[in-house]
Image (tube, grey):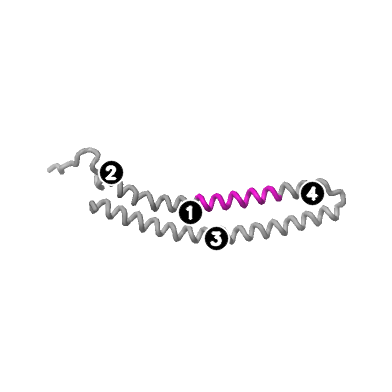
Amino acid sequence: MATPKSPPGMKMAGCMPVPDAGNVSQLMTPQLHMAEKLIAQNIEMLDFLKARFERDREMLGKLAEQSDPMKAMNLWGEFWQRTMTDYSTQIAKLATTASGLAEQAVRTATEESEAIAQATAGK
């Protein structure tokens, strides 16, 4: 016995009702929040890298101007100390951000599940 089919465009993937405008917003809002968190993390990382590369370039300029080998070695030592401090600080920031992303992922999944449940219930 054949099962009745819905008219084209009434169900997604043949089993879920097509969400109305309100349900689409409910489905997309959690995605927006997650994307905002990810983009903010990427901007933070790019800002760090830009500053770090500028410091690297500055150090190379100072090193190129240095004629005393002992002073050059001091520059290298200071450079590596500062570099390690910078990366340690950035790793701590990244760990905090990753924790926030994990929390946001759970909220996003919960909100999406609720939105899907409402869309399939026809509310």
- Residue for badge 1: 37
Which is in the foreground here, disc 4 or disc 2? Answer: 4
The span picked out in magenta is 39-55
Secondary-structure class at tag 1: helix
Disc 3 + disc 4, Cβ < 8 Å? no
Q: CA distance from mark 1 to mark 4?
A: 38 Å
Label 3 or label 4, whichever comes before in sequence order: 4
In magenta segment, residue 40:
yes
Element under label 4? helix
Residue closer to the observer: 119 or 77: 119
Residue that extends furthest to the top in the rendered view of this protein: 8
Q: Earlier in the sequence, mark 4 or mark 2?
A: 2
Q: Earlier in the sequence, mark 1 or mark 4?
A: 1
Residue located 81% across and 46% down the image = 64
The residue at 66%/50% (across/down) is 51
Residue at the disc numbered 4: 62
